Amino acid sequence: MARPPIRPQVWTPPPRSGRARAWRKHRSLPPLDLVPLSGLGPEDVVVDALGRILCGVADGRVLRLSADGREAITLADIAPGRPAGLEALPDGRVLVCDARRGRLLRVDPDKGSAETLADRQGGEPLRLVSNVVAATDGTIYFTESSRRFGIDDWRADILEHSGTGRLLRVGPEGGEPEVLLDGLQFANGLAFGPDESYLAIAETGDYRVTRYRLTGEQAGEYEPFVDLPGFPDNLGAGTHGLLWIAMVAPRDPLLDALHRVHPAARQLVWRIPDAIMPGPKATVWVIAVDTAGRVVHDLQGPSAAFRAVTGVAEHGGRLYLGSLSEPSVASFDLAAVRL
């Protein structure tokens, strides 16, 4: 299938930090425990109130694993859709972002069914629906990474840098979503700050997390929260107000250079076949920041059996990791982290 054309925008990336240049020297990640799956690519990973692990795999299934990982059941199958971001609801149902068909779904595990809460905005179909969270009052917030490209062409959005990502809001029973923020650079992971006073939004294409205020005099305003030395993906709220950030890969100097030059250079790169297209550096990487955006943990290391972290969830003293490319969920004991 022919690739969609791109219309690259010239952009000057922020300076690369020392951490970004020296990523290969950082080796602080504790040993990983792997839970094999019957499918590939648990892009997001969340833990429900009973300690069970939820994830979605590339063939369309939404899975629930027992706390020890020994038992797995299929909650629903949304094929030909592709589950991405997930949110466990208090009543046992699960919100699911269908990144391939552009839908926000709610799965009922008792029925094995999925109902559509949103699939259009302003009369146009949604495109790459990415991540979702639900407030205590039932309000649902979700991201659309790109209005131009689907999940199979996500690299096109990063290369183009046209900023068509959005933050949207919908009521508990769905309907027409309200656009809260537009112009985001590949809007991705979402997580609430303490007391649901703000939303943290990963902008993968801008190497940063943005903060959108939900309460107080600044409600509706937004600002950069933390600049990062790599590509952030999904986010997870941790204990003591921490925000965990799944880092897919470090920044690529070649990509940074391409963004600064004539758009024709990126159009040429986009024509390179997948087999030889440059890919992200292989690493396992998560960062945690406090409510002021200060880095508290920066955990990275090599792993022959797991890489490209796209999902992160803290529960019961462990950190669980998802990946768009791996056939397993990884985890490690937070007590092993050197403070």
Image (cartoon, rainbow, N blue to C red):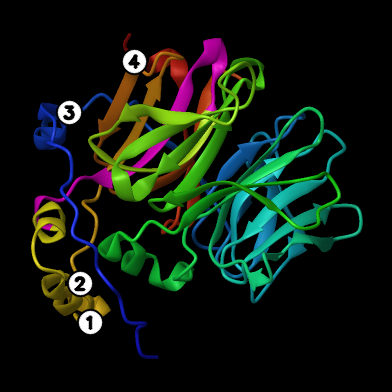
- Is residue 120 shown in magenta? no
Q: Position of residue 260 (x, y in %)?
A: 11, 56
Q: In terms of sequence position, does the residue under pointer 3 or pointer 2 come before the other? A: 3
Q: Position of residue 159 (x, y in %)?
A: 26, 64
Q: Residue 277 carries which label?
A: 2
Q: Is mark 1 on a helix, strand or loop?
A: loop
Tell me how far mark 3 sits from mark 2, CA to CA.
26 Å
Q: Report the magenta residues as a range.
A: 237-254
Q: In the image, which is nearer the foreground, mark 1 or mark 4? A: 4
Label 2 environment density (alpha carbons within 10 Å; few <14, some 14–19, many ≥20): few
Residue at 47 percent across and 48 percent down: it is: 188
Tell me how far mark 1 sits from mark 4, CA to CA.
40 Å
Tell me how far mark 1 sits from mark 3, CA to CA.
32 Å
Determine which residue is flagged by label 1: 273
Q: Which amino acid does label 2 sit on?
A: Met
Quarter that holds the C terminus? top left
Q: Is mark 3 on a helix, strand or loop?
A: loop
Q: Is mark 4 on a helix, strand or loop?
A: loop
Residue at 64 percent across and 72 percent down: it is: 124
Determine which residue is flagged by label 3: 26
Tell me how far mark 4 sits from mark 2, CA to CA.
35 Å
| Proximity of marks 2 and 1: CB atoms separated by less than 8 Å | yes
